[in-house]
Amino acid sequence: MELQISHTTEYAYDAPVDYALQKVRLRPLPSSMQNVPNWAVEIAGGKIETSYTDHYGNHVDLVSIERGAQKLTIRASGMVETLNSTGILGQVFGRAPLWHFLQPTVLTTAGDAIKALPRITGDTGAQLSGLHGLSAAILKALPYEFGRTDVNTPAEVALQGSRGVCQDHAQVFLTAVRLSGIPARYVSGYLMINDRVEQDATHAWAEAYVNDLGWVGFDISNGVSPDERYTRIAIGRDARDAAPIEGLRMGSADETLMVSVQVQQ
């Protein structure tokens, strides 16, 4: 499937900004699930200072704002050819070893609520069945509702609050999976939604390392494994590691953020 994607992030400030630096992970990379014939990241009100590949294999652009500017726009767009691999990325290894994806973070530390979720055991077939069952149990315990959590909400807090979004679903899932001794990681990306083009944000899901298969994806929010409607951008141990954009700025100016995402065939 050929997906046309446009993702615009605009920062507006009520006073001139002397310094701001954004870590931008908005370049999808080729894999067994996707090819990237063309893609561009364009900056208005700033520039790309340098680019590098991080320890997860994500492409990162460091973007600075023009001194004294009051607006910074980051636009990523292009075409991605996606393949339906039934969620199986496979035996793909990067710089980060498997044991790294067993480690908890501030956002993915298990408390009583997550420890009460089902554990995963057995061979490949049993693991897959258990992982899908866990996904369904999380969605039942944590129905989708926007506005109840934010980017800094830990998985345990989200589950105790009984409402969340795709970020929370993914983080609860991978936190629970790690308790069974299975490496798991967070994935940020795009999802083509059949009934609309305009979206308010990127999407998020999780991947678990399954015996004999390698990395397998689970979109807990939608109860499926990623297919040709999904585009992978970045991975990490949690949402912070794989955030499409994160950064810092100096000064007391108030910030207004606008995000527009379009995904269509």
Image (cartoon, helix red, strand yellow):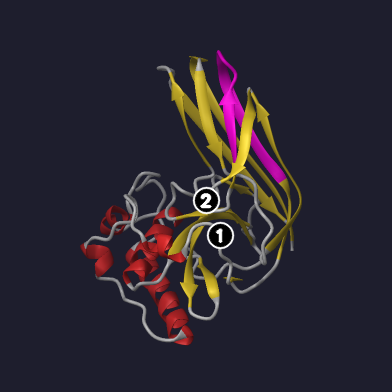
Q: Are marks 1 and 2 in contact (CB under 8 Å)?
A: yes
Residue 257 locus on image (x, y percent): 51, 31
User: In this picture, is 63 found above or below 80?
Assistant: above
Label 2: how many Cα within 10 Å (few below 14, some 14–19, many 20+): few
Q: Residue at 56% of width from left, 15% of height from top?
A: 67
Determine the main secondary structure of the stretch shown in magenta.
Answer: strand
Is residue 74 highlighted in magenta? yes
The segment highlighted magenta reads: 60-77
Q: Quadrant of residue 73?
A: top right
Q: Quadrant of residue 151?
A: top left
Residue 222 locus on image (x, y percent): 50, 65
Picture quarter with the N terminus: bottom right
Given the image, on which type of amino acid does mark 2 rest? His
Q: Which residue is mark 2?
A: 55
How many numbered marks have been drawn onto this rendered protein structure?
A: 2
Distance CA(mark 1)–CA(mark 2): 8 Å
Q: Residue at 66% of width from left, 30% of height from top?
A: 43
Residue 180 locus on image (x, y percent): 34, 73
| Label 1 element class | loop
| Pick the front one: 72 or 257 | 72
User: In this picture, is 128 found above or below 7?
Assistant: below
Q: Which residue is mark 1?
A: 94
